[in-house]
Amino acid sequence: MIARKNNILIILIILSVGIHFYAQNEIRVELQYSKLVYPIISKFLRLIFGWIPISIGDVFYLILSCWLIWIIVNFSRRIIFRKPGNCSFRESIFKIVGLLLTIYIVFNFFWGINYSRRGISSQLELNAGQYDSIQLRRINQLLLQKVNETKDSVIKSNTVISDHKLLFIAAAEAFQSTSAKYDFMKYKYSSIKPSMWGWLGNYLGFTGYYNPFTGEAQVNTTVPAFLQPYIACHEIAHQLGYAKENEANFVGYLAAKNSNNYLIQYSAYLELFMYANRTLYILDSGSSMRLRDQLTPSVKKDIKEWRDFIKSHENPIEPLITYWYGFFLKNNRQPKGLMTYNEVTSLLIHYYQKTGEI
């Protein structure tokens, strides 16, 4: 029995090492995994779980969390009180290591290898990288104009999305519309759901997430309504295999800008303006503030609501979660951690240089 457990652990270690080395070649990952293997896995998961009205991923994480807590508590009690159990200390360690390795393997095979792909820059042939202050100011000006225009269109057309299902349908349709131009953005078998833990996410700092184990895109529907359309687009981008946060931001933007729904357009342009403006603030705070002052009163009102919402949920635990998530991103080929989200600005600048569009 012990020999069998040892063999299983050895197999798990070999598979984990194999995945690690496979992911070192971004061209191989792009051509083999991201374009051939992952789309099959992703569509299958969405087909299986997408029709279920509740979030299976949220339920899965709840069960997994409770199980892990039970294991840790039970394991700690045996160590502290030196109580004999059904298994030895060594066997307990083997179980924990085996569980962690299994999660690592499943996570990467179902989605995580996408962190190593060449990604959207390669697909659009963008020379994304360095940019100068003139380019940064220009993209801020263009985004400022788009934010004000789309907000004005939202008000004039009285565009509202009163139901989450309608929002998710509109976000999915935005990707389908964009796929006419960019084939890699085809989105089939929609699986977008409100997160059951949105109230908790407000305190932990998440507005949405992609569950790689079930293929579901989760949206925190308790955040201000004008943020939710772009969150949905961002999470769909993750479903399509864009794992890095700057790429998910950019792919979500490509879909949103082609939507015929003004609220989806506004939601995307507002977030992108805030990313670009924060980046400009670091370089030139004066220019950043002057541009922000040019936002229309209705946009400023939304930003105030956004900030008040964040402030009302501040707590001592969120910085710890934020630190851990930043550490996770750094260990998944995003060396700037949480600042990776802001790197969408670079993609926008080079996309504008190539296409003249924003």
Image: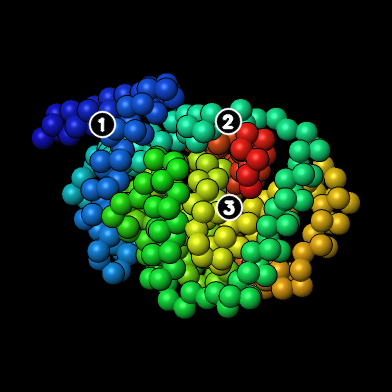
Judge the density around disc 1: few (<14), some (14-19), many (≥20) Cα neighbours within 10 Å: many
User: How far apart are the alpha carbons under marks 1 and 2?
Assistant: 38 Å
Residue 177: in sight, yes or no?
Answer: yes
Asked whether residue 204 is in view, the answer is no
The residue furthest left is 1
Residue 23 is situated, as x and y percent measured from the top left of the image, at: 39, 26
Do tag 1 and tag 2 residues touch (Cβ < 8 Å)?
no
Q: Which element is circle 2 on?
A: loop
Residue at coordinates 52% horizontally, 48% vertically from top-left? Answer: 254
- The kind of residue tagged 3 is Thr
User: Which circle marks residue 12 in the picture?
Assistant: 1
Mark before the other along the chain sequence, 1 or 2 = 1
User: Disc number at residue 98?
Assistant: none
Q: How many angstroms separate mark 3 from mark 2 (CA)?
A: 30 Å
The three-letter amino acid code for the residue at tag 2 is Leu
Residue 109, above or below 274: above
Tell me which residue sits at (63%, 34%) in the image: 354
Q: In the rendered image, which residue does mark 3 sit on?
A: 322
Q: Is residue 164 left or right of residue 84?
A: right
Number of disc labels: 3
Q: Is residue 188 left or right of residue 326?
A: left
- Mark 3 element type: helix
Q: Which mark is residue 126?
A: 2
Quadrant location of residue 36?
top left
Q: Position of residue 290 (x, y in %)?
A: 86, 57
Q: Residue at x 81, y 37 (%)?
A: 133
- What kind of residue is marked 1? Leu
